[in-house]
Amino acid sequence: MKKILDGFVHRRGMHCDTTALRDVFEYSGHGLPEAALFGIGEGLGFYYWKSRNLRHPAIGGRIKPLELDRRACRNLGVGLKINTSTSPKRAYRVMKAMLEGGRPVMMRADIYYLEYRRTRHHCGAHNIVVAGLDEASDTVYVADRIADGLIELPVSRLIDARASLHKPFPPRNLWFEFAFPGSLSLDGSRVMGAIGMNAVEMLNSDVRSVGIGGIYYLASCIHQWKADFNKRDLEIACNAAYGSIEANGTGGGLYRHMYAEFLEYARGLTGVQELESIAGGYHQAGRMWTQAAKILKDVPCGCASLAEAAVAVEEIAAKEHELLTELLCVANLCCKNNGKTSIKTLEKD
């Protein structure tokens, strides 16, 4: 079999998940900006995860894996089925059938086995799209956020990447199937609803290391890092924190610039003027996260201190707390003006 989907276009993106969604949506005739999918998917989040099984703490700025995809599709009226299989052969057969049927295949893959990535680290929560297959040359054509156009990869490496059992987040041959309607359910009320629900979740987490409370918690924990880690592990923790905030597919500033771009998009769609200034505030929050990341990166060499980093994170927490409160007020007002129930009383899945 040789099949490369005609008309499939891929451009590099900010985050693997939203880049893959953007590509599949666009190919299906429903072009949306990557940042819009992040926001409509209620993707803004925060978590700080420290465990004995981890050499360094994990910091994240989005909601948990797969939830963004589910929420984006739900809010846009798109059917979504997420599949896994213990059989690499079955996963390959399904991929081949989808391509033969003219459908790109969004899937998870462990980046360690994607040889063009050249990494020694395992992470199976990475999303890519396969848009072509040439069995005669043992080649698949992959869309990945790091590069424009399609990347050639040996079929065997893709199979290994999909079947990986390495932690964190082993992919387990996971793939997505979408059922697109004739038109997307995209209007101002749905967009403002997504904004309000995301703000509620960030402001009201019952887990101390998650949401806005998690940012305050991170600030308090940073003070203890010197006691928690030896010199080498402290260096690893600080460098990992920098990467989690400023690199690793966050769009810079721990996804905050991406969310700001979504708010700018929402302002144009809804006409809600207040979103413009809040978008500016989230760009500022992104810059603050970048500065905090740089401080942490400078701690091991003695050019900065953990106390400085903790203060920077505390200031971010206060800033985002203010912005999220404003967003919730704006979203609630819009819903009331449209004769709908307050966001605060809506149930989440």
Image (spheres, rainbow, N blue to C red):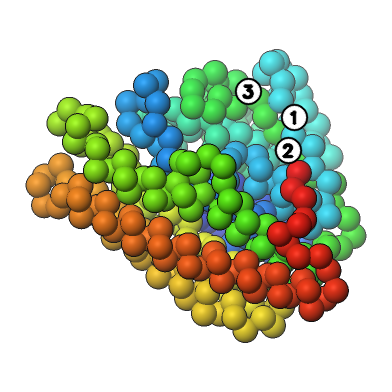
- Percent across and percent down for residue 50 are 39, 31
User: How far apart are the alpha carbons under marks 3 and 2?
Assistant: 13 Å
Q: Amino acid at mark 1?
A: Asn
**Which of the two labelled residues, at mark 3 and mark 1, occupies the earlier sequence position?**
1
Q: Residue furthest left?
A: 302
Q: Which residue is mark 2?
A: 176
- Percent across and percent down for residue 156 are 57, 22
- Check contact, mark 2 vs mark 1: CB within 8 A: yes
Query: Counting other residues with Cα less than 10 Å from the Cα at mark 1, is it few (<14), some (14-19), or many (20 or more)?
Result: few
Image quarter of the C terminus: top right
Q: Is residue 243 placed above or below 110 in the rendered structure?
A: below
Q: Looking at this view, is 214 or 86 the one in front? A: 214
Q: Secondary structure at mark 3?
A: loop
Q: Is residue 216 left or right of residue 188?
A: left
Q: Amino acid at mark 3?
A: Arg
Q: Secondary structure at mark 2?
A: strand
Residue 202 seen in this snapshot: yes
Q: Which residue is mark 3?
A: 172
Q: Which mark is residue 252?
A: none
Q: Which residue is mark 1?
A: 83
Q: Is residue 248 placed above or below 33 in the rendered structure?
A: above
- Percent across and percent down for residue 247 are 38, 50
- Residue at 59% across, 80% down: 274
Image quarter of the N terminus: top right
Q: Quadrant of residue 229?
A: top left
Q: Looking at this view, is 230 or 151 the one in front? A: 230
User: How far apart are the alpha carbons under marks 2 and 1?
Assistant: 6 Å
Q: Looking at this view, is 157 or 329 the one in front? A: 329
